[in-house]
Image (spheres, grey):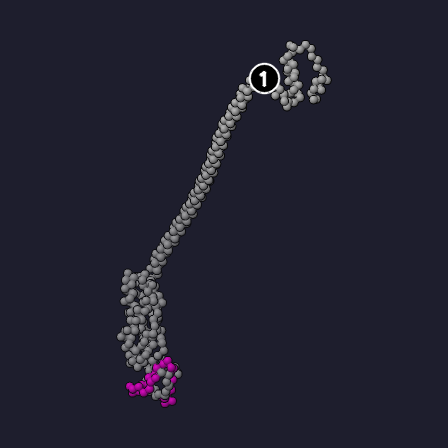
Amino acid sequence: MFGIKFIKFQPSEYALKFKNGKVEKEGAGISFYYYEPTTSIVMVPIASCDSPFMFEEVTADFQTVAVQGQATYRIVDSKNVAKLLNYTVAVRGGQKSFVSDDPKRLPMRVSNLVRVMAKKHIEALRLADAIRSSESLAESILVDLRNNDEIQQLGIEIMGLTVLGVQPSKETLRALEAETREQILKVSDDAIYERRNASIEQERGVSENEYNTEIAIENKNWEVREAQLKAKQAEMRKKNELANEQLDAEINLEEKKKALIALAVQNSRAEADAKAYELKAMMDALSEANIEVIRSLAAIGMQPQALIASAFQNLAGNAEKIGNLNISPDLLQELMVK
């Protein structure tokens, strides 16, 4: 009514009410009435904003890579931004809209600064290193942005920066994939070769173990046989010693028997000599005695049979002197009984 309007802002919107070139009211999330013909309203978003970027750069080995990521920032000096960029809004049908494209240029400025910072880092890297440098590249660019004078003059704060990837061109990527594939195949072939070598080594180790086991068994068998032979030799030696001892004992026994026999012979000889001497002495004594006396002495204590035999012997000796002598069987029987 009569050009007087009411406007309200969100807490994430910093508003400045200009009238006659002076700020009458400012703040985040404020509301006020204003007279449209003489009032300018500036609205600066103070919430964090994401500025995606994607650009191509050349590495140290002249390979083109695409860098893709996102920078997050927020405006911390609204007045300064309002001086450098046109954030004036107009209200149409209750809707606020910027009257210029400056608010859209701020994310582009941030993206351009990111590209400038990334360029010097990408140019110092070779392709293989650049592809793997996402994290380190993001950290380096973030440090450079926070220390950049233009960022500080704009009154914005870089809250974070993420590099989603550094990708080479499709042709280069295919070449890298081919090279990597060949390396992978080579690694696979090397692995197969090493596995075969390991298998051969294992088989050789098993064979050597088998041979060593057989050698050990043969050595053990040889030791057993040698021990058996030694035991047999010891047994034979023991038997020989026992046989020698037995032979020595038999020899000693035979020698003792020989000595005993010699002693017995000597004793028998001595006994015979003694008996011969006794007999000789007796014969010498009898040679001088009367035969009849000797016979009488011999007849003393003789058995009847011996006496009869002696009588018949005397008769036979004097047979020439005897004419006839009759001896009946009864007489002989009677004589034999007596």
Using the image as rendered, state which of residue 84 and residue 135 is in the foreground.
135
Image side of residue 303 versus residue 273, left or right:
right
247, above or below 29, in the image: above
- Per the rendered image, the range of residues in magenta is 1-27
Residue sticking out furthest to the bottom: 2
* Residue at x-position 30% and y-position 81%: 79
Image side of residue 102 versus residue 226, left or right:
left
Q: Is residue 301 highlighted in magenta?
A: no
* Residue at x-position 39% and y-position 83%: 94
Q: Where is residue 61 in the image (x, y as percent from the top left)?
A: 28, 60
**Residue 23 in view, yes or no:** yes
Q: Where is residue 336 in the image (x, y as percent from the top left)?
A: 69, 20
Q: Where is residue 270 in the image (x, y as percent from the top left)?
A: 51, 25
* Residue at x-position 29% and y-position 66%: 121
- Residue type for callout 1: Asn
Instruction: Kindly identify which residue carries mark 1.
Output: 290
Q: Quadrant location of residue 158?
A: bottom left
Q: Is residue 12 highlighted in magenta?
A: yes
* Residue at x-position 34% and y-position 80%: 44
231, above or below 154, in the image: above
**Residue 114 in view, yes or no:** no
Magenta part, dominant SS: strand
Query: Regarding mark 1 in the picture, which secondary structure is present there?
Result: loop
Q: Position of residue 19 (x, y in %)?
A: 31, 87
Image side of residue 173 versus residue 258, left or right:
left
Q: Quadrant location of residue 288?
A: top right
